[in-house]
Image (cartoon, rainbow, N blue to C red):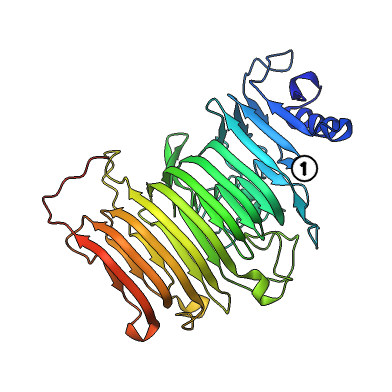
Amino acid sequence: MTDPNDFAGSDSQRIAAAIQAASQDGDRRVILPLRRPDSLSSRNYWLLDEAILIPDGMELLLDGCRVKLSDQARDNFIRTANCGYGVAQPAPVRGIRIIGRNGAVLEGADHPRATGDANKTLGVRTYGTDAGRPGEKQTGDWRNIGILLVRTEDFLVENLTLRNYHCWGVSLEKCSHGEIRGLHFETREVRPVDGTPQPILNQDGLDIRKGCHHLVVEDISGQTGDDLVALTAIHPEISQAGTYDYTEVSGCPLPLADNDIHDIALRRIHGYSTGGHQIVRLLNASGLKLYNVVLEDVLDTSGCEGDGVVCAVAVKIGDRNAAWGGVTPLGDTFNITIRKVDSRCRQCVLVAGSLCDSRIEDVCNRNPACEAVACTSGPENLRNVVVCNAATLPAASIREV
């Protein structure tokens, strides 16, 4: 494996040089161990000024290291090399492996230049040192995402801790036939910067976006500022790739059906949202479909940190938000299986949109103020939905986590 410690320049330059060398020698494997202290710095962690770009067929092994964004960076931790500003048509890539070992950590900047998604104004709704700075974009965008994979097939991301990132932790756009395993998130919606609490918005853990299919997601844990896991197929009107206008970089050039989300397996999602949002969110809108999803073993760990946070919903399906066109037509969200949910959230399993040909079972609701399974969009938006073994426990019930 090629080691960036053996190259010269800034940390970002060394990592880029190692990836280039590994591409040329045919090995296509790069290892990031601890940074070796040298004449430039005594640090033993890697400090990035720009994203690590992963090309086709590359394996990046983060072995016991800490990789941190510098205060000069306004970029991802890691991004597939097929996308970015000015790339109007990201080419497909495959065979990418991003693997953590021995407690590898990806960590955001001490003073992020920008945070939040493309709808958040810096310094008004979310923190960013670029707020009010001439020539700098004054809202968030896809550069705030931690790990960003675009049009990637046959991939693996596993065994990483992501801490204090600037927007979504991991986001997949139009990705397929891949595996996401063993991700742990450590963020809060508000965190101190130089001793002053600052909002850092849109800190989802894992986001599976338009056009993703045939994915396996397992063993997701920790605390996120926003939703822990979200499957979101919305906004097909975004048609231009490679701009800073959106939180997605790949646009929406494909036929509408190719932007659906389908055939996703999610297992062992254990954690909560420190911002009081959802643990798992399933959301499609604007003519995009969401189907063939299996979600198993959702465990709400709120209250275990002693912070008093109660999440809004353990599993939320759909939304009535008018900005996304309201409740999806019946038949757009179907064949969803939800099995084994353990929740103390304000709502347990909530159908807020349409749902058909689906099954919800083995639900343990520990909040007697709500139903184990509820629908707020009306019975006309349900068809052939089977609910079994869904129980609400009395207020005195105690759960060990």
* Position in image of residue 139 (x %, y %): 60, 58
Q: Is 168 left, or right, of 248 in this rendering?
A: left
Q: Which of 340 and 62 is in front in this view?
A: 340
Which residue sits at x=75%, y=31%?
29
Per the image, the residue denoted by label 1 is: 57
Would you say 314 lies left or right of 23 here? left
Which quadrant does the C terminus fall into? top left
User: Looking at numbered disc 1 in the image, what kind of residue is underneath it?
Assistant: Gly
Task: Relative to 365, say whether 334 is above or below.
Answer: below
From what the image shows, is residue 193 above or below residue 374? Answer: above
Determine if residue 125 is in view. no
Q: Which residue is drawn at 63% across and 20% down?
A: 34
Q: In which quarter of the image is the N terminus?
A: top right
- Residue 396 percent location from the top left of the image: 10, 50
At x 43%, y 76%, the residue is 357
Give left or right: position of 61 versus 383: right
Q: Which residue is drawn at 49% across and 63% down?
A: 293
Evaluate whether residue 176 shows in this view: yes
